[in-house]
Image (cartoon, coloured by chain):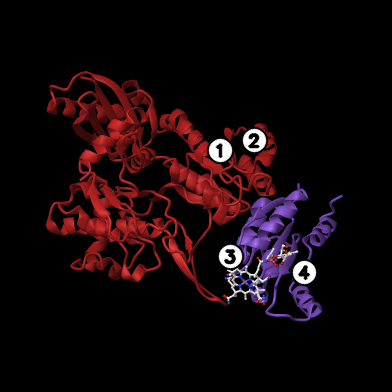
Chain colours: A purple, B red
Amino acid sequence: MKTVVIGVIGADVHAVGNKIIDHVLTEHGFNVVNIGVLSSQEDFINAAIETNAEAILVSSLYGHGEMDCRFMKENCVEAGLSHVKLYVGGNIVVGKQDFQDVEARFKKMGFDRVYPPGINIEDAVADLKEDLNIE
Amino acid sequence: MSVHLLVDFGSTYTKLTAVDIDEEIIIGTSKAMTTVKTDVLDGFNVALSKLENAHPQMGEISAVSACSSAAGGLKMAAIGLVEELTAEAAKRACLGAGALVNHVYAHHLSKKEIKALKQADIDIILLAGGTDGGNKECIIHNATKLKEANLDVPIIVAGNKDAADDIETIFETGQVEYYIVDNVMPKLKVLNVHAAKDVIRQIFITKIIEAKGIKKAEEKTGEIIMPTPESVLYAAELLAKGHEEVEGYGELMIIDVGGATTDVHTIGDGYPKRAEVVLKGLQEPFAKRTVEGDLGMRYSANALVSLMSPYEFKQYYKDVNEDDIQASVKKRYEHVDYLPENEEEEAFDEALARICCDYSMSRHVGTVEVVYTPLGNMYYQTGKDLTEIKYVIGTGGVLINHKDPKRILKEVNQKSDKRLELRPTDPIFLIDKDYILAAMGLLGQKHPKLALKLMKRHLT
Ligand code: B12
């Protein structure tokens, strides 16, 4: 069973989407380690190390995702997690911005997949299975 | 009359407490120097005749229970993966079992760390790492290194269960004495120390006691059932929770200022007291013990003063002559049975005790940290919030024999220069003046209600 770490980064308390992601990924046979809301980069990284996770799915809903996610990839590399896939989704920036732009910025920061608001979580599951070579 | 004798083989003194089970009273207590270097029974016999002479009417002893922290107590090393997670969980399992933990390692053991382990005086190693189903590469690497090191120290494996078979294979090819038990952190941030604590106690009873020359005492005392600090922690838990219709005291703390260490035990959840504070980090044990090997009145007096400048020392004893500090300290750690013979020396002991209380509290309680976020300040708590703890109970020679021990205990309270530490604010102070806590932990194994009643009567 493949392990993934999920959680909501920064000072963000939006808990509903996180619960749904937990449920859907579990249904699809993942071992979900949910660190919940108000999680720091360090919390994600420590969780991934101990649980041997293969992907980290970061949620950010409150608009400050770009700031909270700065240097996350670098910190993962530093902690020996270069191989771990990094995803981010939710309302990751303030207000409505051109998504292609946003995606490009987060990819440059080292995220493997970046999702716009309102994404169907099943689409992300398909990506995850592809990236982790499942089936 | 049915007399239960409780024996604590301490680092300095062997302490006896006789309890009349039918009358529900403590008949008396006595002590004598612990004599591990010669024959541990010598000290025991001296203490016993003192007790019998003082209480000639005392009936025949029908049961004996004993604990021990003699010959350096129980010393352990804890190894995990992430410092704040499995390494911390492993450390807490050791502390909860009554051990002193001076060596804690995270991630892959290096040659340097293996060397340090080889040179260290350690009784047991606790090896953790990875949640169940999580990382197993690290714990397997560390098991391999430990095997190669040929340490001749029992190793308890309490890590990722998926690694257990591989580790068994590794250890079986070497001459390693090992025990595989449940993971100390089976799921992320979930602490599970019971299985590890049980084997620690088992190894302590069967092996360590023997190696330290204390086994011989069992001819007279029956099996030595646990390390002394574990017994105190058990007494604390009993006193907090109560038993059947006898009510307990609720959340409480015991601080034991000894010759070699200062131990702090708290019973309580310690959850955040304010809604805006968010709890972080590994789950805390309900009954939590920390032990400070560099804070003690005699063996560790030197280590204690080396933590601070003479100026800082003066904050605890303003009339001290700075040039005398070293000499006073030397006198204490070279003569661990030293008792102050004048007012200056008493004041010096009081200063040491204050420092033990103050510093051990800083390390025991949780802290809040202010995080500046886009949405304003947020407060994160790590560890326990003990601001509302109701009782703080002092024990250990210096507190018990002091004329005003509560003055010393006040050092545990909240301080203006340590605002981020979640220390007690206005607790009721009690003193273990008859020195019975460890004994009551022992008695409580068989007679919990009686032990509880006696503690409530004797702690004042
Ligand atoms: C409910 C709510 C709250 C509640 C949250 C209660 C709780 N504990 O959950 C409360 C009132 C506390 C709240 C507070 C705030 N909120 Co609010 N909130 C909402 C609201 C109305 C619904 C959120 C929700 O639950 N949606 C339902 C779930 C199922 O959807 P979801 O969270 O989007 O998650 C799904 C997807 O996004 C996706 N997804 C999420 N993460 C990831 C990650 C990956 C990798 C992938 C693949 C997919 C994915 O999958 C999820 C499941 O389908 C939204 C508006 C909206 N309609 O979305 C605003 C909204 C999120 N909030 C907003 C704001 C600004 C705030 C506040 C800052 C307001 C303030 N000034 O005080 C505070 C922030 C508090 C904090 N510290 O976090 C803004 C964010 C704007 C932005 N990003 O630019 C929104 C969008 C409203 C708006 N249009 O302005 N909020």
Side of B170 relative to B445 (left or right): right
Q: Earlier in the sequence, mark 1 or mark 2?
A: 1
Label 1: element kind: strand
Q: Which residue is mark 2?
A: B171
Quarter of the render that holds ligand 1: bottom right
Q: CA distance from mark 2 to mark 4?
A: 47 Å
Residue at 77 percent across and 71 percent down: it is: A116
Residue at 56 percent across and 53 percent down: it is: B85
Mark 3, chain letter?
Answer: A
Mark 4, chain letter?
Answer: A
Residue at 48 percent across and 42 percent down: it is: B122
Q: Which residue is mark 3?
A: A38
Count neighbours of disc 1 (C-alpha within 10 A) and say few if under 14, some if 14 to 19, many if 20 or more: many
Count neighbours of disc 3 (C-alpha within 10 A) and say few if under 14, some if 14 to 19, many if 20 or more: many
Q: Earlier in the sequence, mark 4 or mark 3?
A: 3
Query: Are the residues under badges 1 and 3 in a single subunit?
Result: no
Question: Front-most of B291 and B324?
Answer: B291
Side of B203 relative to B395 (left or right): right
- Please tell me whether mark 1 or mark 4 is closer to you in this view: 4
Query: Are the residues under badges 4 and 3 in a single subunit?
Result: yes
Q: CA distance from mark 1 to mark 4?
A: 47 Å
